[in-house]
Image (cartoon, grey):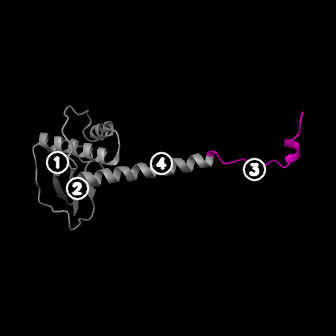
């Protein structure tokens, strides 16, 4: 059994099979659902759907709260909203505590970003390796006064 949770509206779907395509929430239109291959105890499968507009407002409020707690600029919350829904937000709700599904989605995004940075850092280190000293020149050759 596979559990698919929308980070926006907490809409939960239990599926037997799942294709390669990223699922899109049928209620709020969020395009980046969190997929669990094995259900955990805390993941209640009872659905608590909200209206799409309420879900979008709660999602942006949770993103704004997370940005404020971490000391990020509030524009980062708007960028994450655009990543989720594909458009810029037209609303400005007060920050509130995010849902568990949204927190999990944010943690996964941070983990992906950290992995990309580690990979990039490894590439930079390979490119900027110091060259071994030449066998033809020694320290006295470099300290010549002209």
Whether the residues at callouts 2 and 3 have beta carbons within 8 Å, the answer is no
Query: In the rendered structure, which segment of residues is drawn in magenta?
Result: 127-146
Q: Where residue 7 sits in the image (x, y, percent)?
A: 23, 49
- Closer to us: 14 or 86: 86
Whether the residues at callouts 2 and 1 have beta carbons within 8 Å, the answer is no
* Quarter assignment of residue 24: top left
Under tag 1, what secondary structure?
Answer: loop
Under tag 3, what secondary structure?
Answer: loop
Under tag 2, what secondary structure?
Answer: helix
How packed mark 4 is, by other alpha carbons closer than 10 Å (few <14, some 14-19, many 20 or more), is few
Q: Which residue is mark 1?
A: 9
Q: Which residue is mark 3?
A: 132
User: Which residue is pictured at 45% across the width and 52% down the height?
Assistant: 115
Q: CA distance from mark 1 to mark 4?
A: 30 Å
Q: In this rendering, would 90 be left or right of 68?
A: left
Q: Which residue is mark 2?
A: 100
Q: CA distance from mark 2 to mark 1?
A: 11 Å
Q: CA distance from mark 3 to mark 4?
A: 27 Å
Q: CA distance from mark 2 to mark 3?
A: 52 Å
Q: Where residue 87 sits in the image (x, y, percent)?
A: 25, 33
Q: Where residue 92 sits in the image (x, y, percent)?
A: 20, 35
* Quarter assignment of residue 46: bottom left
Dot 1 or dot 4: first in sequence order is 1
């Amino acid at each position: 059994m596979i559990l698919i949770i929308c980070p926006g509206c907490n809409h939960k779907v239990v599926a037997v099979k799942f294709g390669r395509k990223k699922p899109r929430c049928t209620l709020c239109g969020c395009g980046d659902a969190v997929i669990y291959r094995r259900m955990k105890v805390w993941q209640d499968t009872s659905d608590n759907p909200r209206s799409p507009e309420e879900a979008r407002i709660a999602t942006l409020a949770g993103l704004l709260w997370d940005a404020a707690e971490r000391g990020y600029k509030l524009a980062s919350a708007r960028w994450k909203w655009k990543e989720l829904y594909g458009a810029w937000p037209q609303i400005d709700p007060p920050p509130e505590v995010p849902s568990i599904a949204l927190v999990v989605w944010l943690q996964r995004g941070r983990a992906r970003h950290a992995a990309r940075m580690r990979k990039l850092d490894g590439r930079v280190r390979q490119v900027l390796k110091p060259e071994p000293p030449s066998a033809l020149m020694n320290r006295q050759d470099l300290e010549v006064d002209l």
